Each structure stands twice: as structure tokens, then as C-alpha cells.
Amino acid sequence: MTQFDGRTILVTGASGGIGGATVRQLAQQGANVIAAARTEEALKEIVAETGATPLTFDLTSEDSIASALDGLSLWGVVNCGGFGGEIATPLDTDIEVFDKVISINARGSLLVIKHAAPGMIAAGNGGSIVNVSSQASLVALNGHISYGSSKAALDNITRVSALELGQYNIRVNSVNPTVVMTEMSNFYWGRPDIGGPFLEQMPLGRWASPEDIAGPIVFLLGDDSQMVSGVSLPIDGGFTSR
């Protein structure tokens, strides 16, 4: 047996790099994984590979989230669904893009917690929630006014949720990754003039892989971290230690 046998864990953003790696690691450790994304087409590959159960909903719609999560018996949640938005300063940000980033990254994650937690509480078995935040919530990064703000809000959602749900033995934590060179991030961080100077400031000097982030997520979900709650864990090669 593994620590996740008999435990059902929802992973949003399961079609992405970090979400997919998390689904794989959880499935390998015996979890019943529900892989969520906006469309079934996006989930075909990860579902075929892992045997996860597909689930679709729109993170911008509370009705969609509430309907999808109604009746689910969950032990854990990974809020990995996200939107990168734009590269912009406070002076030239498109406020409609800002609103969309907040709506998906912060509001959407909160709504998943809002509609997943009652069932977890009713089951009486405790549980664990991990929100995928960013180093951009911990330090200021050029051009990241919308993304960084959304992830800073998500970190506060983590802390308050940990405070409120601890009485039910439900832990809530965040992971705060550095750049994972996914399709979403490559358009900006893949530029030599941007990525090169950034890596020079990072003690470990390399980009993270999806697996680098999935491992700590699985740790925070599992019993080895059963006294860890309300934490925002940097997974950033030492960047925010500077």
C-alpha cells in the first residue's frame, strides 16, 4: 500500500506541464486522480497515459465549478489551473487581461476550494490542498504586474484557508515555482535577453522541470508533511533567497 491508496485527489490544469507531472506522480503512488481542464480534448493524452478520471469545468464560472464538483468525494486538491496573461508594467497593463488573470489564478482557485472543501469536511477524513503559486508572488519581476498580483492573492487564499480549515484537519499550502519552461512561459523567458540575466541571478542556474515542482506538491499532499499548513514553499533554485 501507499499513502494515497483509497484517496481521491483533484488536479486542475491537468493538461499542462506541472499538472500533468503531478497527475503522473500521484497515479504512480496509488491515488485515484481526477484530472481537470477546460476541455476533454485537452485531457485525452494524460487520461490515456495514467488512467485518471477526466473532469471539465471553466475556472471563470462558479456555476461550472459548483456543478462539476457537486457530489465528488475528495481527499485532496491541487489547484494548478492558471493563465499567464501579459507581460506589462503598471503603466501599460490591459486591465481586461489583468481581470482575466485574477479571475482564473486567484478567484478560480478560491472557488475550487469553496466547492471542494464542504465534501472534504463532511467526509471527516481530513485532507490536503496545494495551490500552485509562483515566485512572482514573493519578489517583484519586471512585466509581471497581473500574474504576480494574482499569485500573491493566491498565497493569501492559502493562508486564510489553512487557518479556517485546520479545525477539520485539512491542510492548505502553496508551492511557488520559478520558471518552468512550458509552452506558456517560453515566449518570454525563452528569449536570451530575458532568460540569460535571470538565470545568472539564480544560485542553481537552471530552469525547473515539471517534475521538480510535482515532487514537492506530492510531498505536501502526503502524510510526511502532516504538520505543514499555511506555507508558501519556494521551488526556485534559490532565486528568492538573494
Image (cartoon, grey):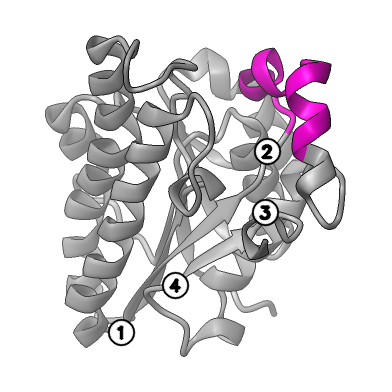
Say what amino acid the circle numbered 3 marks.
Answer: Ala
**What is the chief secondary structure element of the magenta stretch?**
helix
The reply, left or right, for residue 186 in relation to residue 192 is: left
Answer yes or no: is residue 28 visible.
yes
Look at the picture and state if 161 lies above or below 12.
below
Measured in 3D between alpha carbons, the distance from the residue under mark 3 to the one under mark 2, in whole angstroms, is 14 Å
Q: Residue at x 30, y 84 (%)?
A: 169
Q: Which residue, as the protein is rendered here, is positioned at the far left?
A: 63
Return the mark for residue 214.
3
Frontmost of labels 3 and 2 is: 2
Q: Does residue 37 lie above or below 121 as drawn?
A: above
Residue indicated by mark 4: 231
Q: Position of residue 86 (x, y in %)?
A: 45, 15
Check disc 1 and report the residue beneath it. Answer: 169
For the residue marked with disc 2, what is the amino acid? Val
Instruction: From the top left corner, tell me how far across and down residue 164 is, in percent.
Output: 17, 75
The quarter holding residue 161 reads bottom left
Q: Is residue 195 within the magenta segment? A: yes
Q: Quadrant of the N terminus?
A: bottom right
Q: Amino acid at mark 4?
A: Val
